[in-house]
Image (cartoon, helix red, strand yellow):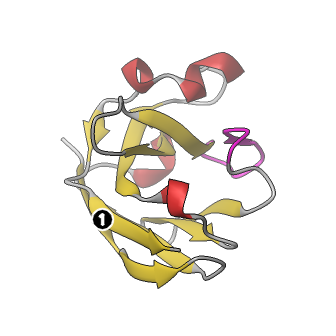
Amino acid sequence: QVQLVESGGGLVQAGGSLRLSCAASGRTFSNYAMGWFRQAPGKEREFVAAINWSRTSTFYADSVKGRFTISRDNAKNTAYLQMNSLKPEDTAVYYCAAAYAPPGSLHSAQYYLYQSYDYWGQGTQVTVSS
């Protein structure tokens, strides 16, 4: 089992920044790919960003590319999502997720799919006001 706890959400004005954190516990963090998804009211959960275990590959939704940055610190068992130039349409509950992914086990396309992830956090609310 892997437990994931998100933090760092809140209310911010358009154009502002937030940094989300995802603290993991329970298994060897470096064996897991990490992803961020979000869900706005009335909408399906959507992929935001992902990073592989070695930090050599990152993946982004087109809607956040150039504004958001995913990173991880394997020594601290923590993944991050730096969100800059926030827009009202970024308002959502943001979820951290972990996928068991030994080296070479995940095809690039799989990082974008929520079905690839084994563990989920409880979510943190991000609200961007206009």
Residue 33 x/y as whole percent: 52, 40
Circle 1 crowding by C-alpha within 10 Å: few under 14, some 14–19, many from 20: some
Write the residue at 76% across / 50% down: 65
Q: Quadrant of residue 73?
A: bottom right
Name the quadrant containing residue 118: top left
x 56%, y 44%: residue: 48
Q: Which percent across, then down, holds residue 35?
A: 49, 44
Q: Quadrant of the N terminus?
A: top left
Camera sees residue 62: yes
Q: Which of 112/44 is in front?
A: 44
What are the residue bounds of the magenta stretch?
52-63
Would you place residue 57 above or below residue 17 in this image? Answer: above
What residue does disc 1 label? Answer: 125
Magenta stretch mostly in which secondary structure? Answer: loop
Task: Report the residue at 38% width, 80% height from top.
Answer: 11
Q: Amino acid at mark 1?
A: Gln
